[in-house]
Image (cartoon, rainbow, N blue to C red):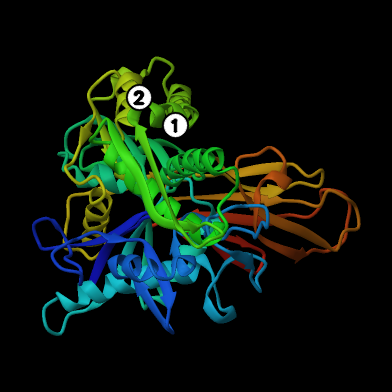
Amino acid sequence: MSRLGIDMGSTNSCCATWDGRAARMVELAEGVNTIMPSVVTVADGAVYVGEEAIEIGKRFPEFCFRHFKRRLAEPWNDNEDTGHQTCRGPDGMLHFRGPNDTTYSPTELVSFILGALVDAADARMQPHDHVTGAVICVPADFTRSQRDAMIEAAKAAGIEEVELMHEPTAAALAYGFDVKKARRIAVFDAGGGTIDATGVQTGAGLVDVLSTNGIRDLGGEDFDRRVADYVINLWRTEHGSDLKVRDAAMVRIMTEAEAAKKRLSDKQETIFRIDDIDRTKEGIALHMIYPINRATFDELTRDLCERIQGSCRSLMNDLKRQDANFSAKDFHDVLLVGGMTRVPAIRQLVKEFFGKDPKRENSPEQVVAMGAAIRAAVLDGRKTGLSIADITSHALAIETTNGMAAVLVPRGTSYPMADSFTLSNPDAEQSEISVRLMAGDGARASTCELLWSADIPIEPGEEQSARVGLKVKIDASGRASVEVGDQRYEAAA
């Protein structure tokens, strides 16, 4: 019986296990490679994942799905260009169109990747051993709905016991710091779909998250999109018209845009090339071939980098509220996590902001999974001498009668925690108190995410005469529970 540590990434995914002494990556079915592209292709009545999905997807680009993790629990918006054909699912959420009128929710697509990782791990375990649970890492800024969707995907993949963990916390564990020594660490995590900046403190065997600030709608996909838009505009200028088969072509363009971005991390110039992307009226094949250099790439993405730097500034503002004298240069170490930290412009902005050379593993895509495996070993009792105190990414609040959000648990609260509150009737002769539990950081309830609502019966009486107890708990895994009257709500980790 074993728990995996899983990094379910927007671009790539991987998993790790604890071997008794250290975390080690799991070799996947595709060979010795430990990284699986987060790609799913549906074709010929079958579902393909990873490298195989990429190969099959070359023949069925419209059914080759990427970057679906960031679409978890996302309402459908017919004006949004995801690079795929989408539709409104029966739940009112965004679904991807598959072949023969099939549709797939982002949760289903995530479950295919998770299932493949579990199968790969099971195949390499000792006889009579198999995966029963997993610690799955999520961006620190994930909403409650997105966390619920990730747990649902894990359950669909056959993972019986699911714990969620923040990606930057996992990364801090994986870098192997001596947690007995007092150190302040900044973790900068830039992946395919999200950006996180987190402050962590170690000491006395504790990994304590001080603050985290994330951007859940910014990542490598957005940089790819800028390259794609650039070459599409060049094509329009050259040919005087748009591509005839835009939907199918966009998948190929986004794929090559990502590849060109990666090449520009090591080279000053590359060639963006897609053969036979369109045809003339006479049926002659047209190729998309354009040079692009790093300076152009940096200019195309300058505003995205400014947003990323803003995340670092927001982290420091949070930390200054805890310690007015704290500055970015007070961090002992700065860690880089995620594939986007290979981009030179991002590494440079992190270096300049924190005033020191950041540390980066040879494979920044693996450190999150390794940290999750360490956490799994702690939960299983196979690793001792380590405690983790994470923090809430969003406030928990209840809606007041005037539509405001009354905060119960502030953003940035360390957990595990528990607290009690008393509710009363604002008006005379009420027969019930309406409780609407929200998650978010806005002052008005309408800007927050509704988690749960309940009507608690009371004895009618004078204004403020009723007394109803409300208890809030967040356990060590980040699961929130609320009890009020005889009603109970449990949230995802």
Q: Residue at x 40, y 46 (%)?
A: 257
What's under tag 2, amino acid-wise?
Leu
Question: Is residue 139 shown left or right of residue 79?
Answer: left
Label 1 to label 2, Cα distance in Å?
9 Å
Mark 2 lies on residue: 349
Q: Position of residue 246 (x, y in %)?
A: 55, 56
Q: Earlier in the sequence, mark 1 or mark 2?
A: 1
Residue 475 seen from this side: no
Mark 2, residues whose alpha carbon is within 10 Å: few (<14), some, or many (≥20)?
Answer: some
Q: Position of residue 236 (x, y in %)?
A: 56, 42
Q: Secondary structure at mark 1?
A: helix
The one nearer the camera, 468 or 164, is 164
- CB under 8 Å between callouts 1 and 2? yes
Q: Residue at x 55, y 53 (%)?
A: 243
What's under tag 1, amino acid-wise?
Ile
Q: Residue at x 42, y 83 (%)?
A: 44
Question: Is residue 92 shown left or right of residue 136?
Answer: right
Q: Residue at x 37, y 18 (%)?
A: 326
Q: Position of residue 141 (x, y in %)?
A: 48, 45
